[in-house]
């Protein structure tokens, strides 16, 4: 069974009502990224950061996987599917995908401010003001912020290096180190990219572009991949 590796970004969840940072009306227009999505922002104003992610968590609780998420499930009948996601939502899990690596953490988890391995599942509830982890440190969102290392990137690079087919869905390929994963994909591996907007692909690969949103784009991808299986 061929190994299909799929890198997903914010555009994967946009049709589920999850706002992106970059789109018009998106999160960066309400909050400067350095205030709510950086380790420096956390040190400066943890209460603001907690409020921001509490709001994101509540929003996620009312969101549902879209046809793009559910469309990937059928591919598991024909391929060994591995999803590497830049998203912090749990919509891939809720849709039923089985092999998912989160590069940037998960909204439905919190962790110790001291120990990144001390993680708890909190679902869609708020992290309360002054709430502590079991080690006594402030409880923070389990999110990899700007200015922090991406612990899962080496595992992601290894997964990408064994891809027989590689697909990118809803990612601008501007955020590193995730955008660099395409450089680990073997050069002769077929690469597909789904995004309704033009994306500059930083790679020597020949890329098949599907200029659609996630739902329609995944439908087209499934048809094309079945021709390869």
Image (cartoon, rainbow, N blue to C red):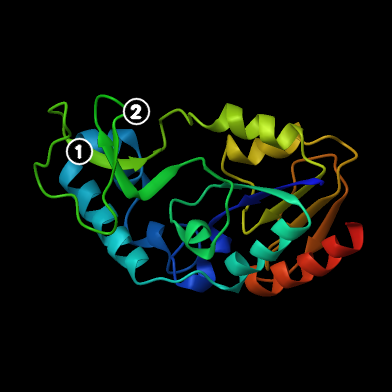
| Res 139 label | 1
Q: 187 or 197: which is nearer to us? A: 187
Q: Mark 2 or mark 1, which is nearer to you?
A: 2
89 versus 188 height, above or below: below
Q: Where in the figure is residue 54, as x and y percent of width and height?
A: 24, 56
* Distance between the alpha carbons at the discs numbered 2 and 1: 12 Å
| Res 122 label | none
Q: 217 or 200: which is nearer to us? A: 217
Q: 177 or 160: which is nearer to us? A: 160
Q: 50 or 21: which is nearer to us? A: 50
Q: Where in the figure is residue 107, as x and y percent of width and height?
A: 35, 51
In the image, what residue occupies the spot 75% across and 32% down? 161
Residue 174 placement, left or right of 36: right
In the image, what residue occupies the spot 24% across and 40% down? 140
Res 84 visible: yes
Q: Quadrant of residue 159?
A: top right
Q: Where in the figure is residue 154, as x and y percent of width and height?
A: 59, 27
Does the residue at mark 2 contact the one at mark 1 (Cβ under 8 Å)? no
User: Which SS class for mark 1?
Assistant: strand
User: Which SS class for mark 2?
Assistant: loop
Tell me how many marks there are: 2
Name the residue carrying label 2. Answer: 117
Q: Earlier in the sequence, mark 2 or mark 1?
A: 2
């Amino acid at each position: 069974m061929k190994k299909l590796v799929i890198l997903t970004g914010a555009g994967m969840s946009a049709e589920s009502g999850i706002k992106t940072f970059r789109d018009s009306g998106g999160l960066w227009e309400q909050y400067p990224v350095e205030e709510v999505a950086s380790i420096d922002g956390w040190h400066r104003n943890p209460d603001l950061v907690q409020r921001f992610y509490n709001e994101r968590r509540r929003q996620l609780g009312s969101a549902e996987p879209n046809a793009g998420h559910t469309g990937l499930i059928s591919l598991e009948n024909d391929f060994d599917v591995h999803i590497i996601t830049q998203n912090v939502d749990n919509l891939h899990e809720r849709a039923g995908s089985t092999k998912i690596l989160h590069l940037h953490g998960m909204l439905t988890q919190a962790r110790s401010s001291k120990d990144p391995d001390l993680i708890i599942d909190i679902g869609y509830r708020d992290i309360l003001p002054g709430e502590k982890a079991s080690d006594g440190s402030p409880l923070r969102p389990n999110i990899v912020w700007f200015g922090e290392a991406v612990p899962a990137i080496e595992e992601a690079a290894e997964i990408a290096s064994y891809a027989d087919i590689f697909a990118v869905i809803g990612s601008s390929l501007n955020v590193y180190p995730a955008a660099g994963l395409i450089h680990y994909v073997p050069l002769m591996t077929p690469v597909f990219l789904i995004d309704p907007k033009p994306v500059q692909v930083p790679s020597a690969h020949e890329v098949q572009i599907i200029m659609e949103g996630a739902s329609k784009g995944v439908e087209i991808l499934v048809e094309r991949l079945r021709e390869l299986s």
